[in-house]
Image (cartoon, rainbow, N blue to C red):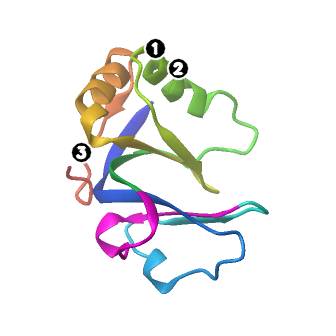
Amino acid sequence: MKFTTVPGRFAICKLGAASAIPGWAATKPVFSITATPDELSIICLEASVPDGIQTERGFLALRIEGPFAFDAIGILQSFLAPLAKASVPMFAVSTYDTDYIFIHEKHWPQALRALQQAGHELQQAQSSKN
């Protein structure tokens, strides 16, 4: 399968469940906001996160080239299994069309090698330079 990198460095943030969605969270090229009864979880460009927010920084992202049908099976798993085998921790987010995988920059070269060794193809897109 093909994948591309997403430009930018990302942060994964946690706010309280009762928190309002902050304006700084909606930063392109990619952001994700998930509200649960326990937390408000935000993935956004790390430069937009203000001080004082519970945050893990230094993530890079890849995008599995979709779109995929809703009944497609094993797409995300085909990426996660080689990462797990290579001991690369990750954070995945699924969208309507595809999946994004966030990997800390210290594991990035190892992750790219593992995915390519598993037969996945890194595509160079105009907007994907990390």
Q: How far apart are marks 3 and 1 (CA)?
A: 25 Å
> Which residue is depicted at the point 65% across and 69% down?
16
- Left or right, 87 with respect to 16, comes to left
Looking at the image, is mark 3 or mark 2 nearer the viewer? 2
- Number of numbered tags placed on the structure image: 3
The image quadrant that residue 3 belongs to is top left
Above or below for 28 versus 39: below
Question: Residues under labels 3 and 2: Cα distance?
Answer: 23 Å
| SS at mark 2 in the image | helix
Q: Earlier in the sequence, mark 3 or mark 2?
A: 2
In primary-sequence order, the first of circles 3 and 1 is 1
Q: Position of residue 113 (x, y in %)?
A: 27, 22
User: Percent from the top left, x then y, of residue 73?
Assistant: 70, 30
Q: Residue 108 carries which label?
A: none
Residue segment shown in magenta: 39-55
Can residue 30 be seen from the camera position used here? no
Amino acid of disc 2: Ala
* Left or right: 70, with 16 as reference point: right
According to the picture, the residue beneath numbered tag 1 turns out to be 85
**x, y percentage for residue 125?**
26, 51
- According to the image, label 2 marks what residue? 81
Circles 2 and 1, Cβ within 8 Å, touching? The answer is yes
Mark 1 residue type = Lys
Which disc, if any, is residue 124? 3
Q: Is residue 51 magenta?
A: yes
Q: What residue type is labelled 3?
A: Gln
